Image (spheres, helix red, strand yellow):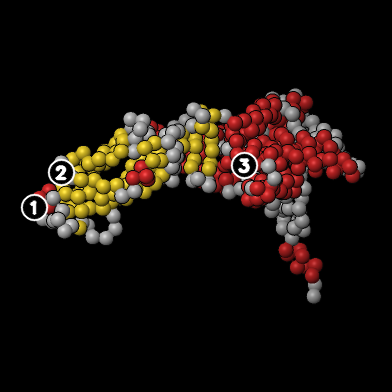
């Protein structure tokens, strides 16, 4: 059997993925560093974000964390406000607000998140790659490692990775358990909190795997955001783009009257600096994380050959095609309106939550009962959530109509700690005359706590006609 012809048939014409060799093996990328203006700006943003990530779990507003995702107690604290599992509307509006913000930012600024703020890019490009360059050295300025580093130097590099990943994993854990609990865990044996230790160790290993081995594959293969960009971007969205009108036909060497050419001198610098290994001159690609490295590389080449910068620049597909700029388009009008609507709803839903939540649920079984004395009974369950920072004792009464007796079956349930929630069984008793004629009667239940918060719940008394 002639296998060579099969090989030729199966061989792809070009790289299907920038990190894959034609034979299917991993193509390791060692991007060169272009330390231009954009890189300097990104470096400032990256270091600020790193500090913010570490500092946030330590910040308090009114004694509460700024952010705490407490899955065990099923509570979310944001900007000092705690939300409970009963706050489904608030959580839905919050998630919707975040989602619409992402869609709006992408429609206007393209993949600014990927290049400037995504932890993958921030830590990879501004923490772990500099560590690689320090320990392994580079051939020339940035790029491929020099190779042949001593074994202990290689071990030292892994140790530094391990320490940093452990620190980041602990910080990550602090967002879920709080810094006080984390500090207690750090000082005690892992045997006292085995599941938290497993989460921390698993997160550390996952980070080691990602930053040591997986690297840009996270953006190219695993992250779904890049794949969504074609839906979220339009021709007017900001992208990092190569200007083919100005650059083509590309050609190395001097331009002469006889051999005119575009501004691209085909130096390949925009490719060798790309952390995802693509050639921006092929147009908008899913792999481009808008990191601006190719802008910096090309601008420095343009400066050397005496041409104006901006052959690769922040642009839009329409601008590169010399089409007019449109500030107002369907997306930039519709998305802000939707964002305003959901964020306003979120704001008012948050503001309406004060003191406590109280929800009255009708008891299961028959709608009413008649006692031996001829009185009508209705049973309920009252869901109470204490949203204050202190313990509370609740008082409950039927505000109207008159003549209704309320009985709380387990009175001790009306004492609730901060953040606690409980289901209190209640029953009311009234004379059959109250519902005579229609079989029901509107009523009001008044609930108050120790801190002068009170609310009224409308409900119906059910009884014989
Ligand atoms: S093409 Fe340019 S902006 Fe896009 S990832 Fe590569 S270097 Fe960054
Ligand atoms: S860096 Fe600029 S000049 Fe060099 S190949 Fe890329 S686009 Fe052309």
Density class for disc 3 (Cα within 10 Å; few <14, some 14-19, many ≥20) is many
Q: Is disc 3 placed on a helix, strand or loop?
A: helix
Pinpoint residue 209: horizontal percent, then vertical percent. 72, 49
Pinpoint residue 253: horizontal percent, then vertical percent. 80, 33
Q: List the single residue furthest toward the bottom.
A: 1
Q: Which residue is the site of mark 3?
A: 173
Q: Which residue is the site of mark 1?
A: 437
Q: In which quarter of the image is the C terminus?
A: bottom left
| Foreground tag (1 vs 2) | 2
Q: Quadrant of the N terminus?
A: bottom right
Residue 326 is marked as none
What residue is shown at x 22% (from left), y 41% (from top)?
Answer: 398
Q: Which residue is the site of mark 2?
A: 403
Evaluate whether residue 257 shows in this view. Answer: no
| Foreground tag (3 vs 1) | 1
Which circle's residue, 1 or 2, is located before the other in the chain? 2
Q: On the rendered structure, is 224 left or right of 293?
A: left
| Foreground tag (3 vs 2) | 2
Which circle's residue, 3 or 1, is located before the other in the chain? 3
Q: List the single residue furthest toward the front.
A: 373
Q: List the single residue furthest toward the left.
A: 437
Q: How far apart are marks 3 and 1 (CA)?
A: 61 Å
What residue is shown at x 45% (from left), y 33% (from top)?
Answer: 389
């Amino acid at each position: 059997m002639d296998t060579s012809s099969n090989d030729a048939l199966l061989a792809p014409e070009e790289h299907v993925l920038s990190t894959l060799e034609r034979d299917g093996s991993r193509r390791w990328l060692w991007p060169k560093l272009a330390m231009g203006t954009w890189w300097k700006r990104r470096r400032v943003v990256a270091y600020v974000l790193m500090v913010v990530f570490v500092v946030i779990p330590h910040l308090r507003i009114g004694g509460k964390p700024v952010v705490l995702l407490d899955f065990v107690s099923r509570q979310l604290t944001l900007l000092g406000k705690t939300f409970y599992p009963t706050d489904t509307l608030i959580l839905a509006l919050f998630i919707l607000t975040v989602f619409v913000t992402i869609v709006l930012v992408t429609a206007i600024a393209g993949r600014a998140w990927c290049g400037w703020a995504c932890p993958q890019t921030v830590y990879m490009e501004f923490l772990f790659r500099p560590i690689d360059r320090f320990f392994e050295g580079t051939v020339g300025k940035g790029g491929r490692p020099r190779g042949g580093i001593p074994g202990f130097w290689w071990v030292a590099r892994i140790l530094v990775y391990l320490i940093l990943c452990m620190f980041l994993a602990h910080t990550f854990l602090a967002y879920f358990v709080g810094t006080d609990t984390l500090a207690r865990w750090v000082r005690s044996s892992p045997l006292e909190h085995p599941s938290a230790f497993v989460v921390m160790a698993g997160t550390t290993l996952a980070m080691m795997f990602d930053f040591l081995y997986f690297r840009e594959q996270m953006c190219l293969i695993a992250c779904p955001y890049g794949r969504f960009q074609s839906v979220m971007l339009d021709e007017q969205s900001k992208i990092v783009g190569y200007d083919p009108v100005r650059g083509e036909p590309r050609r190395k060497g001097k331009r002469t009257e006889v051999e005119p050419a575009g501004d691209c001198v085909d130096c390949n610098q925009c490719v060798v600096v790309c952390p995802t290994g693509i050639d921006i001159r092929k147009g908008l690609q899913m792999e481009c994380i808008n990191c601006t490295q190719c802008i910096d590389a090309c601008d420095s080449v343009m400066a050397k050959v005496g041409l104006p910068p901006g052959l690769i620049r922040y642009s839009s597909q329409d601008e590169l095609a010399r089409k007019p700029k449109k500030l107002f388009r369907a997306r930039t009008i519709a998305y802000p309106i939707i964002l305003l609507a959901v964020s306003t709803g979120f704001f008012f839903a948050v503001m309406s939550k004060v003191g406590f939540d109280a929800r009255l649920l009708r008891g299961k079984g028959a709608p009413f009962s008649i006692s031996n004395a001829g009185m009508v009974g209705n049973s309920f369950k009252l869901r109470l959530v204490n949203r204050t920072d202190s313990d509370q004792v609740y008082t409950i009464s039927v505000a109207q109509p008159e003549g209704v007796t309320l009985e709380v079956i387990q009175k001790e349930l009306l004492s609730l700690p901060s953040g606690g929630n409980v289901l209190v069984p209640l029953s009311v008793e009234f004379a059959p005359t109250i519902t005579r004629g229609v079989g029901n009667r509107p009523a009001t239940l008044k609930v108050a706590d120790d801190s002068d918060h009170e609310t009224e719940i409308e409900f119906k008394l059910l009884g014989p006609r």
